Image (cartoon, rainbow, N blue to C red):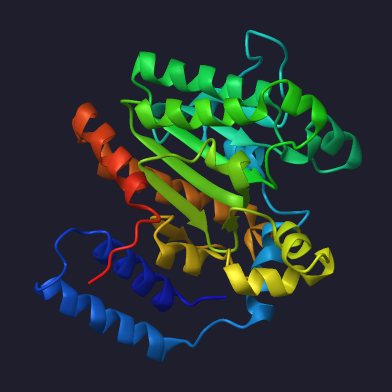
Amino acid sequence: MPSEAEIRLRQRLSKLAGMKLLRGTKLSGELERLQDQLEHLQGEPSAEEIWRSVELARHQDRPYTLDYVERILDDFFELHGDRARADDRALVTGIGKLDGRSVVLVGHQKGRDLKERTKRNFGMAYPEGYRKAIRAMALADRHGFPLVTMVDTPGAYPGVAAEQHGQGGAIARSQAAMARLSVPTVACVIGEGGSGGAVAIAVADRVLMQENAIYSVISPEGCAAILWRDAGEAQKAAAAFKPDAPHCLELGVIDAIVPEPEGGAHEDPDSAAHMLEAAIVEALSEIESLDPEERRTERRAKYRRMGVLAFA
């Protein structure tokens, strides 16, 4: 588990690396200095340490979206249905008050027991779920409420029925809807951030990630099945693509790491909720002062920069 010092260094590195015109400026020297500090502080995490993050992200007692809603939102009112076909229980949407401000919430919800997991489809949404999310996003934009999303899914449901209902298109439309919002948006990866099912509600101004969460384009088992035709090599795959929070911050796909209680969020959900609430409020405070058009422009630029290679 990374230390607080390491997390602070990685966050500072991430912010500097995202700034323009680093070459030939004092910022470049600062970037190199911080990188050297990080290398001295801790070597590359072992495969076992990375896999530990995967296990904690999937822990059956880890707080889910509604556990955090209960602790950090007041007067929460859940919204149901996509106004077209059905109400997907894998995605929760609603309105509540966060630190005195009205916000719209969208989040994945897994289940605690087999009955609830079946009802919520293990947090894997159908297209109806993403249409419900888009409906909530439109409501936030119409009334000027900030949007907060909580990501915790192995991925969008890959079944035949979901494909027949237009799964790929629903995910793409959800991403496009988030990119166009004029209101402040904060996404929080609170457990598993798997594939398009996660990104569909994570195109935000600020993306936070809890210390023991994971965020990746594919599950370790799926990656192992493709590369080695053996899902049992999941630990090897995770060590290769590094879905843990420190590496996601270093890669630039998240903006900050939210600390957790010792041993993981499930050990003290109240403290975990307090830390998450403080991080969300701070992120909203940073972006609320921006002009809506400037906010949209910066958001689009942020995601266009991801994955771009620059050669000297």
Quick check: can you spot residue 76? Answer: no
Q: Which of 80 and 310 is in front in this view?
A: 310
Q: Furthest-bottom residue in view?
A: 40
**33 horizontally vs 198: left or right:** left
**286 horizontally vs 100: left or right:** left
**122 horizontally vs 153: left or right:** right
Query: Residue at 73% across / 14% down in the picture?
Result: 86
Can you say whether 125 is above or below 260 in the image?
A: above
Q: Furthest-top residue in view?
A: 83
Q: Quadrant of the N terminus?
A: bottom right
**Whole-percent x, y for residue 174 in the image:** 51, 28
Can you say whether 137 is above or below 6 in the image?
A: above
**Whole-percent x, y for residue 54 in the image:** 68, 64
Quick check: can you spot residue 277? Answer: yes
Which quarter of the figure has residue 230? bottom right
Query: Residue at 53% across / 30% down in the picture?
Result: 172
